[in-house]
Image: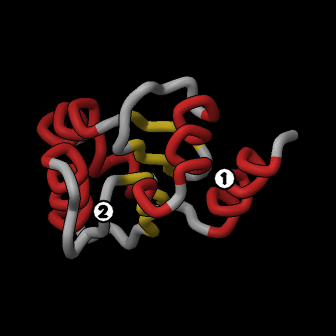
């Protein structure tokens, strides 16, 4: 396993909800990351964030790791949920809320 994948695995093992995003929840650096954090905050979910702009290896590595080309990426219990469009869809249908209740 390469070191970047190991780093990602460690983060996913340490936190049950991880959002790989551009920027921080306080200062998102793209609209999609802003929307993703707003959804999680609205649901009252405790989540860990990783600012991919601070780490080029993670930025590229997370795309390969989940075989998902865009950021943000939400992981819940080590499973890729998806990006902000999928999060928004799941939020609107109530699926996301149910996911966190499980």
Of the two numbered discs 1 and 2 in the rendering, the one whose residue sits closer to the viewer: 2
Residue 23 image position (x, y, % from top left): 30, 62
State the residue at coordinates (38%, 72%). 46
* The N terminus, quarter of image: top right
Q: Which quadrant of the structure image shows residue 39?
A: bottom left
Residue 102 circle label: none
State the residue at coordinates (45%, 54%). 52
Proximity of marks 1 and 2: CB atoms separated by less than 8 Å: no
Secondary-structure class at tag 1: helix
Q: Is residue 3 above or below residue 23?
A: above
99 to the left or right of 94:
right
Among numbered discs 1 and 2, the one appearing first in the sequence = 1
State the residue at coordinates (25%, 39%). 84
Residue 8 circle label: 1
CA neighbours of label 1 inside 10 A, class few (<14), some (14 to 19), many (20+) = some
- Confirm whether residue 19 shows in the render: no
64 to the left or right of 7:
left
Residue 97 image position (x, y, % from top left): 28, 51
Residue 25 image position (x, y, % from top left): 26, 69
Q: State the CA–CA distance, disc 1 to disc 2.
A: 17 Å
Extreme residue in the right direction: 1
In terms of depth relative to the viewer, which is nearer, 75 or 70?
A: 70
Q: Is residue 29 above or below residue 86?
A: below
Which color scheme did the rendering employ for the protein? secondary structure
In terms of depth relative to the viewer, which is nearer, 10 or 102?
A: 10
Q: Which quadrant of the structure image shows residue 66?
A: top right
- Confirm whether residue 97 shows in the render: yes
Secondary-structure class at tag 2: loop
Q: Is residue 15 above or below residue 18?
A: below
State the residue at coordinates (58%, 52%). 77
- Check disc 2 and report the residue beneath it: 23
CA neighbours of label 2 inside 10 A, class few (<14), some (14 to 19), many (20+) = some
């Amino acid at each position: 396993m390469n070191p970047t994948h190991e780093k990602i695995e460690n983060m996913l093992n340490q936190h049950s909800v991880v959002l790989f995003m551009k920027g921080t929840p306080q200062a998102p650096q793209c609209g999609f990351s802003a929307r993703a954090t707003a959804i999680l905050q609205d649901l009252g979910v405790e989540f860990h964030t990783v600012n991919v702009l601070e780490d080029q290896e993670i930025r590229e590595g997370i795309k390969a790791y989940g075989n998902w080309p865009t950021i943000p990426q939400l992981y819940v219990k080590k499973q890729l949920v998806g990006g902000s469009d999928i999060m928004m869809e799941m939020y609107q249908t109530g699926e996301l809320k149910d996911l966190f209740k499980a």
